[in-house]
């Protein structure tokens, strides 16, 4: 009987020791301690299965090349309604996980040699993506929509 009590005490002690070293793991779904370094890299539109709206731009591409502790600026391109091929610069200022941004660019088509494009919005930074609501103007009229950019 004494042997079985000793065995039970040892088993309980081992079980308690195993519980004491239990670790919990979490997976981040949004950036923590976000700095402007999180913006560095190339960001491209996610390929969508739906047809774009006739007033939305598609194929966003942003590559920040200059940065300060709170902002990043770099080359920007997209395609806007009317076949406008857009190229210029976009700048963003990071505050927590939001990015206030603007893009100023020129666009062209075979029929229109030069067209000004201005876009603006407040984007939301995720772990490896940016949700980019935008609105703006082109020489062919207003544009607006939401693009999701993934870090490449």
Image (cartoon, helix red, strand yellow):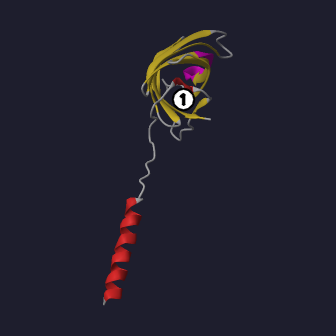
Q: Is residue 142 magenta?
A: no
As drawn, which residue projects farthest toward the bottom?
1
| Residue matched to label 1 | 38
Would you say 113 lies left or right of 46 here? right
Q: Residue 81: x, y in percent?
A: 55, 22
Quadrant hosting residue 151: top right
Q: Which of 45 and 8 is in front in this view?
A: 8
Q: What stretch is highlighted in magenta?
A: 80-89
* Quarter containing the C terminus: top right
Q: Is residue 87 magenta?
A: yes
> Which structural element holds mark 1?
helix
Above or below — where is 7 with respect to 82? below
Specify whether residue 80 is in view: yes
Q: Which of 19 and 100 is in front in this view?
A: 19
At 55% across and 18% down in the image, what residue appears? 72
In the image, 61 versus 143, the foreground residue is 61
- How many marks the image carries: the answer is 1
Secondary structure, magenta segment, majority class: strand
Tell me if 151 is positioned left or right of 55 in this view. right
Residue 21, position in %: x, y? 42, 59
> Dividing the picture into quarters, in which one does residue 43 lie?
top right
Q: Residue furthest front?
A: 2
Quadrant the N terminus occupies: bottom left
Q: Position of residue 48 (x, y in %)?
A: 54, 38
Mark 1 is surrounded, within 10 Å at the Cα level, by few (under 14), some (14 to 19) or many (20 or more) other residues, namely: some
Q: Is residue 142 visible?
A: no
Identified at 59% across, 13% down, the residue is 105
């Amino acid at each position: 009987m004494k042997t079985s009590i000793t065995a039970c005490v040892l088993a309980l002690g081992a079980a308690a020791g195993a519980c004491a070293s239990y670790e919990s793991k979490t997976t981040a779904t949004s950036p923590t301690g976000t700095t402007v370094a999180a913006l560095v890299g190339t960001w491209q539109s996610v390929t969508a299965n739906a047809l774009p709206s006739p007033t939305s731009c598609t194929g966003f591409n942003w590559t920040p090349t200059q940065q300060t502790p709170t902002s990043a600026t770099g080359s920007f391109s997209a395609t806007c309604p009317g076949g406008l091929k857009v190229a210029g610069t976009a700048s963003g200022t990071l505050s927590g996980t939001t990015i206030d941004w603007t893009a100023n660019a020129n666009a062209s088509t075979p029929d229109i040699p030069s067209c000004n494009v201005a876009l603006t919005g407040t984007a939301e930074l995720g772990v490896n993506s940016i949700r980019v609501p935008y609105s703006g103007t082109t020489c062919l009229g207003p544009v607006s929509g939401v693009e999701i950019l993934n870090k490449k």
